[in-house]
Amino acid sequence: MILMTKTITFRPDEEAMRALSVLTYDGAPVSTVVRNALIEAARNRVRQDLLEEATRLAADDEDLAEAAQVLKDMETLRAW
């Protein structure tokens, strides 16, 4: 999927302005800081979603039983 380059505007509150001040203190451009923050936020969301799914599956007795059965079935295919 190709996205067109767009300009995004937002109205930062005081907390966001403080964060921008911290992140741009070294001279980094605001656009770079915001871009990096969005990418990091997306990565964190994906990690959190995967963690929640793994936790749910680890507690799913039916799924665990099926996985155990697959391992048992595969054991018979093992070359000695």
Image: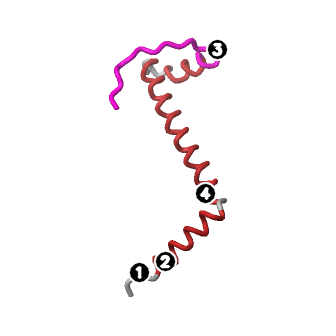
| Label located before the other in sequence (2 or 3) | 3
Task: State how far apart marks 3 and 1 are (Cα).
Answer: 63 Å
The residue under the point 60% across, 66% down is 64
Q: What residue did someone put label 3 on?
A: 14
Q: Nearer the viewer, mark 2 or mark 3?
A: 2
Residue 13 screen position, x and y as percent: 62, 14
C-alpha distance separating marks 1 and 2: 7 Å
The 10 Å Cα crowd at callout 4, few under 14, some 14 to 19, many 20 or more, is few
- Mark nearer the viewer, 2 or 4: 2
Contact (Cβ within 8 Å) of mark 2 with mark 3:
no
Question: Foreground mark, 3 or 1?
Answer: 1
Q: Which residue is labeled 4 in the image? A: 57
Left or right: residue 62 versus residue 4 is right
**Amino acid type of the residue that numbered disc 2 sits on in the rendered structure:** Asp
Residues at badges 1 and 2 in contact (C-beta under 8 Å)?
A: yes
Q: Nearer the viewer, residue 80 or 18?
A: 80
Q: Secondary structure at mark 2?
A: helix
